[in-house]
């Protein structure tokens, strides 16, 4: 493995774009001015950020047995500690929502700007073209 490969291996996988450049690495970055301070940072990948959040949420619940969150009582079972159950449910929801959001963000990035899709509307019968942007200029 050469030096550039080693450098790439150490970088955060959430970069939007990073690769070998010259003798080191290059990435797409932005520079913004906040009041009188110039702030620069590499652009993150939207899909990668959402996927990372999904994985982080999954990591918190993967070893949890949901039944262990409930306690037995003579009248039935229920959690003595609702917080643990609610935390579990929040992480599970986060895992699912961020997973699907990562897929949507990825699809939005890879759809070409000039892509057109025509679908048929049954009532009233007509064809309607849809592109990456609507005719009024808004994103679909």
Image (tube, rainbow, N blue to C red):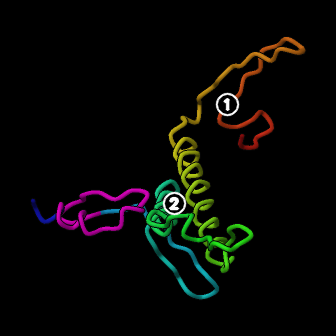
Q: Residue at x 17, y 63 (%)?
A: 4
Vertically, is 59 above or below 40? above
Is 38 situated left or right of 42 in this image? right
Question: Considering depth in this image, is 82 or 33 the residue closer to the camera?
Answer: 82
Most extreme residue toward the left, as rendered? 1
Question: Residue at (64%, 86%) from the top-left corner?
Answer: 35
Secondary element under disc 1, as helix, strand or loop, is strand
Circle 1 residues within 10 Å: few <14, some 14–19, many ≥20? some
Which portion, as a residue range, is magenta? 5-25
Which quarter shows the C terminus? top right
Residue 50 is left or right of residue 128, and the answer is left
Kindly indicate the quadrant of the structure image that contains residue 108: top right
**Up-down relation of residue 109 to residue 44 (above or below):** above
Earlier in the chain: of badge 2 and badge 1, it is 2
Q: Nearer the viewer, residue 33 or 133?
A: 133
Secondary element type, mark 2:
helix
Point 60% across, 88% down: residue: 36
For the residue pair 75 and 134, the one nearer the viewer reads as 75
Label 2 close to label 1 by CB (< 8 Å)? no
Q: Position of residue 21 (x, y in %)?
A: 24, 59
| Viewport quadrant of the N terminus | bottom left
Residue nearest the observer in this picture, 40 or 36: 40
Q: Which mark is residue 54?
A: 2
Mark 2 residue crowding within 10 angstroms, few (<14) / some (14–19) / many (20+)? many
Residue wearing tag 1: 131
């Amino acid at each position: 493995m050469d030096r550039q490969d080693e450098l790439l291996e150490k970088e955060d996988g959430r970069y939007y774009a990073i690769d070998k450049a010259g003798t080191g690495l290059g990435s797409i970055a932005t520079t913004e001015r906040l009041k009188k301070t110039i702030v620069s940072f590499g652009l993150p990948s939207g899909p990668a950020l959402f996927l990372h959040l999904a994985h982080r949420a999954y990591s918190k619940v993967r070893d949890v047995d949901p039944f262990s969150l409930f306690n037995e009582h003579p009248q039935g079972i229920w959690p003595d500690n609702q917080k643990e159950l609610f935390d579990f449910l929040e992480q599970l929801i986060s895992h699912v929502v961020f997973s699907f959001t990562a897929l949507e963000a990825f699809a939005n990035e890879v759809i070409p700007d000039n892509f057109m899709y025509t679908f048929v509307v049954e009532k009233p019968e007509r064809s309607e073209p849809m592109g990456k942007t609507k005719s009024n200029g808004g994103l679909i």
